[in-house]
Image (cartoon, helix red, strand yellow):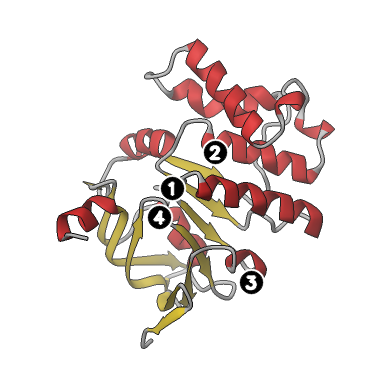
Amino acid sequence: MSEQTKANNVLVELKNINKMFLTDEVETHALNGINLSINKGEYLAITGPSGCGKSTLLSLLGLLDTANDGMYKLAGHDVSSLKRDERAKIRNSEIGFIFQSFNLISDLTVAENVELPLTYRKDLTKQQRAKNVQVALEEVDMAHRAKHFPSQLSGGQQQRVAIARAIAGSPSVILADEPTGNLDSKNAETVMSILDKLHANGATICMVTHDPRSAARSERIIEVFDGKIVSDQFNNDVTAIAV
């Protein structure tokens, strides 16, 4: 593969990313010198103990927060220093989120929850939004529940709706934060099977997880410790990085 082809295949690129929080005049360095590239179509798991910085890293990848310094390129565009409204626009069109707590709106139906992020997209007509919602719900086998409300669904069903919401806008990357954290083993298996299928169909997935069984289903595992990437495992080839 040529260098140009490799460059064209890189979807996410982080260079020397640092993130510090200041609370009660105490500096907390959440991320220290993070360098990470994610290719299109890759399935990546981010692991590590609580408080190690993995959720902060996912927030930066999702443009929910910004680094103190360093460079972040998404699909070849530098998004490091964008204003809040510019970040929101790119986030809505390029990034799909799956949260541990589902984050569905209780007084909206399943279909309305899935459609909600699409209503901010000026490039989609009402008819296109409806089609996207239908296709996404079919993908997670929840089309028959389109008119139900979240309170009428099990936790596993709510997470499947959340996945539909994440993929309805055809994002460049899906970011999943502990997607099975609130589920029993049966529903967790269903959700992970859906993610497996999405990846097999070409989706780029970046998942934060505490569950080694979930992490093992990805093709690459990044371990974070004290705000640094300390290992990068791909196809059983573990590269240790000095802390």
Q: Earlier in the sequence, mark 3 or mark 4?
A: 4
Marking on residue 212? 3
Please provide percent x and percent y for residue 21: 42, 65
Please provide percent x and percent y for residue 238: 44, 81
Position of 193 with respect to 52 (left or right) is right
Q: Earlier in the sequence, mark 4 or mark 2?
A: 4
Q: Quadrant of residue 148?
A: top right
Please provide percent x and percent y for residue 23: 47, 66
Marking on residue 60? 4
At label 1, counting other C-alpha atoms closer than 10 Å, the crowd grade (few under 14, some 14-19, many 20 or more) is: few
Q: Mark 1 to mark 2: distance in Å?
A: 15 Å
Q: Earlier in the sequence, mark 2 or mark 3?
A: 2
Name above or below for residue 121 compared with residue 216.
above
Looking at the picture, which amino acid does disc 3 mark? Pro
Name above or below for residue 88 compared with residue 16.
above
Q: Mark 3 to mark 4: distance in Å?
A: 23 Å
User: What SS does tag 4 mark?
Assistant: helix
Position of 196 with respect to 233 (left or right) is right
Q: Which residue carries the number 1 mark?
A: 64
Q: Which residue carries the number 2 mark?
A: 166
Marking on residue 241? none
Q: Quadrant of residue 212?
A: bottom right
